[in-house]
Amino acid sequence: MLSKHRIVACLSLIVATVAVVGLSLLWPLSAPLIGKPYSKLLLDRNGQLLSVKIAADEQWRFAPVSVLPDNYKTALIQFEDKRFLSHFGIDPLALARALYLNLSKRQVVSGGSTITMQLARMIYGNKPRSYGQKLLEFHLALRLEAQYSKQEILTLYAANAPMGGNTVGIEAAAWRYFGRRLSELTWAESALLAVLPNNPSAIHLTRGRGQLTAKRNQLLQKLQRKGYINVQDYQLSILEPVPGRPVEWPKRARHLLEELVKKHPQQAVFYSHIDSQLQQKIGFLLQQHSRRLAAIGVNNLALVVADNRTMRVTAYFGNVTPQAKTEYSPHVDIASKARSSGSTLKPFLYASMLDNGDIVPETLIPDVPTAYGSYQPTNYDKSYRGAVSAKDALVASLNIPAVRMLNEFSYQAFYGQLKQLGFSHLFRTADDYGLSLILGGAEVSLIDLTTAYANLSRQSQAAQQLHQQALVLSGDGQVHDPAAYPITPGAAWLTLDALSAVTRPGLHNMHEEFSGTKKIAWKTGTSYGLRDGWAIGTTKEITVGVWAGNANGEGRHLLTGTRAAAPVLFDTMNIIEDLNWLDKPVTALKTIEVCAENGYLPKYGCPRKQTSMPVSTQFEKISPHHYRVPIDSKTGLRSNGNCNKQGRLLSKTFFELPPSQAHFYRLRHASYTPIPAFGEDCEHNVSTILNAIEITYPRPGQLISLPRYLGGEQGEVILRANAKTPNAQLFWHLDQKYLGATRTFHELSVPVRPGRHLLRVIDEQGNIRQLRFTVVR
């Protein structure tokens, strides 16, 4: 008989053993249980798969889903472990049955493993079977049951079960074999995926299909017999074919997925706002345009669609190429990369100057040969208009007026505006960009540009509208303080209203004759060297941004925003339904009177018209082009008291531009009538002659850097001027030295030494204009 001490010792040992075992079961398992990398998924706004990137170990393995559908759970439990919900990780009955079968068959025909034990085996890396390894798996199964719920164990098993080839997990298999989410699978499909891990090689396209179908049907029959599905569902389910081949992985918005993976390398699933149906429609359209552009040597296209109401990106094409050739850089996401802005920033300068009180839409801007030091902008059509309204300059995308406007507004101030508008690729200082900031000197990306135009549309609709970044992912994006947005609703609407008048390519305004044509505010841009073609369009609901070009920066003769990108823009707009024009923000605008001829505040009774401007802005510029002068009522010539003996003197208001502007302006405006000359019998002072001469180059105080020719000779300065009278003769003097005379075309090329110089120009009536400039080496 055992002594009391031995009994106590035995009991203590038993208690200690139980305690140790209990503690070992409750000792926290390290996470993650299975440290395998996941594939990267991009989902659309409805949870459908847009694109997928294989895991780092070359497996199609998706992150576990939070909830398994009931039909799959039922099929899996009935096939693999019918007592799963009641056992504690090890099923003694299943083990006894397996032992009996193995002994009677004299070979291993059943393992008796539960779902939990199979998960434990996966966690150990599917090591070779042995009694010692089996005991470890038993222990781990018990720990799993002690620390995880049945639902969590099922989810982990389903996410890591082998599904044939390099497909791992139920979610990956659902997409791979049926092209649908797990929650959308039928009973037959769920049953197939339930039996597949039992023999995953059976999914091979050329062998084992009959065995796989038989296993599936046996499981379906079991489900029908136990009342999980009715007879009709069973009969229909067994008629469903086993997949003949894996479904091709979708490749929509794959560039976006690559960019998101770079930004968030630890994230496995990206929930986007992309509309997969819209993405598919536009994708077909872009393939057609890609082939069209390839014929002219343009091999890359990018497009972004943003919903103005929510700032969600609903379509994203980072790079579309006619062929997947390496030289076309098909894998580069051009939509997020910086490119030359071309003329696409002009609307933001226009809006900023409206807000600043520098202009109203009708304000005339000089359009004449212009130079700022060595920087000499030219218009795309190489012509000049003398003077053009700010609105018309924007509509025609004229370069010289834009540079003059930027010079008045200040490129430093505009640089700050662009930063506030969300342009994130401006990596240089304002002084490094200078005046070229408005003509393609800036670096912008398609996504930033589309966002900026979308925000301009949003801002035009309400004074309290927030400025936002484009929302690519669900829950993504940053909201900016409303006070930080630098453009008022009134200026935004006036700018977009002007852009709605831009002539569409090939139509010559014919679209205005068709009531069904959608009204769109749009702008094109072309970079220097014909390397980038832009087209951005916006309505009340959406903004579409298009870029066309070559990824390697190679220019092409026909690569312009109008020719290459605009047709893509309008075709995209045409397939999007229910687009409306922007509501006019009446409370954000006010009406003022300006001179009809030049858009300045009235002076001397000039003909007037009404115009709109931002309600909080003060426009205080009085017309500099209107003059009231005495006229002889009989001759129509200018007069004064010295020669008007018969009392025929009338006071009349004239619109007259400076000579340099008038020279080009009169070519396009036949009705232009400047101040007439004095009558022959009138005596007058030279000081009374208005706008007789204008020196157009150099400008007062300008620094001129002269080039040297190949032979080492110093270059010459080209002096230019304009006279009010078309056939006037001008006499040129430099530093008191007479240079010569010109008539009609007033231009001289002269050698000038470094240093400060005085230029003086005199006409036949003795009118004088002079200025100082400096030549530097």
Image (tube, rainbow, N blue to C red):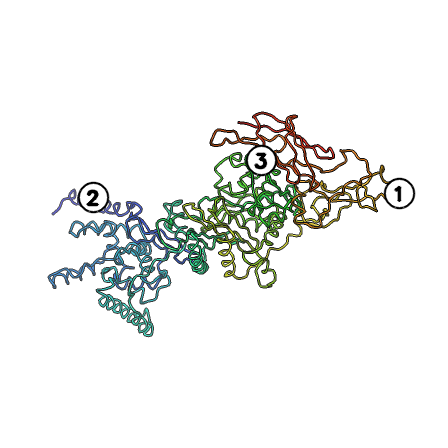
Answer with mark 1 or mark 2, whichever residue precedes in sequence. 2
Answer with mark 3 or mark 2, whichever residue precedes in sequence. 2
Determine whether the residue tagged by mark 1 lies in a helix, strand or loop: loop
Residue bearing the label numbered 1? 646
Q: Who is closer to the viewer here, 121 or 412?
A: 412
Label 3, residues with CA under 10 Å away: few <14, some 14-19, many ≥20 = some
- Residue 715, given in percent of the width and then of the height, sits at 53, 31
Label 1, residues with CA under 10 Å away: few <14, some 14-19, many ≥20 = few
In space, the residues marked 1 and 2 are separated at their CA atoms by 139 Å
Residue bearing the label numbered 3? 372
What is the quadrant of residue 746 in the picture? top right
In space, the residues marked 3 and 2 are separated at their CA atoms by 98 Å
Q: Nearer the viewer, mark 1 or mark 2?
A: 1
Decide if residue 112 is on the left or right side of residue 481.
Answer: left
Residue bearing the label numbered 2? 12
Label 2, residues with CA under 10 Å away: few <14, some 14-19, many ≥20 = few
Residue 269 versus residue 441 in the image, above or below: below
- Residue 279, given in percent of the width and then of the height, sits at 44, 58
Q: Who is closer to the viewer here, 682 or 663?
A: 682
Report the amino acid beneath label 1. Answer: Gln
Residue 39 versus residue 484 in the image, above or below: below
- Residue 158, given in percent of the width and then of the height, sits at 30, 57
Report the amino acid beneath label 2. Answer: Ser
The residue at the far right in this view is 646
